[in-house]
Amino acid sequence: MDVGVLTVPLGDQSLEDALSYLDGVGVDAVELGCGGFPGDDHLPRERYLDDEDAQAELHALLDEYEMRVSALATHNNPLHPDDERAARADTELREAITLADQLGVDAVTCFSGLPAGSDAGTVPNWITAPWPNEHAEALAYQWELAVDYWSDLAEHAADHDVQIAIEMHPNMLVYEPHGLLDLREMTNEHVGANFDPSHLYWQGISITDAIRLLGERDAIHHFHAKDTKVYEERARTRGVLDTTAYTDELERSWLFRSVGYGHGEDHWRDVVSTLRMVGYDGALSIEHEDSLTSANEGLEKAVDLLDDVIFETTPGEAHWV
């Protein structure tokens, strides 16, 4: 395993400056945004797609800092009820997959997207309960759209031999492991997870159990190292479906935190060990979204903790058996 970073928080720096900084703090891999919510500060698709000279320059820069690219990131909503927004997200995803193939990158991280609840809807609708019955009907409608879209996109990924790593995210159709497996079953094995535990903690999902569930089915294509802290004194009365602004930290029932500030080192040792058990040996890509500290401090503290818990070697022969 190696420690990686999603470089979005360093978007005010050039890619070379970001790589130099990350190399200096002990990072081995980068996840580069190339569209959607992550933006494309470090990898504008228009510059690199189908341009062998630009791609060669990128590889030379990565080699200079002994850095690899763990994934390209383009998180957006290709199922949006606004046709223009959906088309833009679809273009971003398809071009990201093609560019990943051209760059020799294994995975593209993304969201599943979320439709409206009917043909008449204009706003994406996250269904969280099967009753009243129109909600169950809306969910069935959403899955019909999703399977039609993702079946075609999964074939595009298969043609390029690139893994689609979907981040299970509330306010998206796929927000927990069983939904991810359902979509994978209905499409193909190129559809899997960008396993980000931060969105699962506050839902009450056991991270190591979820890793086993997905990993035993070879459905973890990438991993985000990001933590969450649930503040029980708020959650006891507010619950965890909390619409309080992320920057109103005192009132929120949970916050995204830097690795180690939601769960301690022992927990992260269990996470890494369970990833090893199910055969995941890729990057732990740090995603900084902690409003209580700066990006640099959050990244560096996460790197320090992960350096202590990751496995840098492969297992040898079990001589004791």
Image (spheres, grey):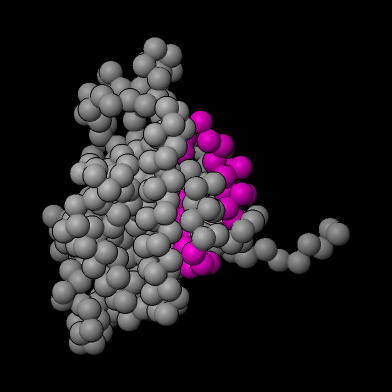
Residue shown at the point (23%, 84%) measured from the top left: 50
Q: Quadrant of residue 223?
A: bottom left
Q: Is residue 303 visible?
A: no
Farthest residue to the bottom: give it.
52
**Residue 95's spot in the image, x, y percent?**
26, 72
**Residue 259's spot in the image, x, y percent?**
41, 41
Q: Quadrant of residue 40?
A: bottom left
In front: 138, or 181?
138
Residue shown at the point (59%, 61%) measured from the top left: 218
Q: How many marks?
A: 0
In front: 23, or 82?
82
- The residue segment tinted magenta is 187-215
Q: Is residue 69 visible?
A: yes
In front: 38, or 302?
38
Residue shown at the point (22%, 79%) measured from the top left: 49
In front: 53, or 300?
53
Q: Is residue 87 above or below residue 259?
A: below
**Residue 211 lies in the magenta stretch:** yes
Farthest residue to the right: give it.
321
Residue shown at the point (59%, 55%) measured from the top left: 215
Left/right placement of residue 246 relative to residue 129 reads left
Left/right placement of residue 278 relative to residue 195 reads right
Q: Quadrant of residue 318?
A: bottom right
Quadrant showing the C terminus: bottom right
**Residue 36's spot in the image, x, y percent?**
22, 57
**Residue 313's spot in the image, x, y percent?**
59, 64
Left/right placement of residue 138 relative to residue 123 reads right
**Residue 160 lies in the magenta stretch:** no
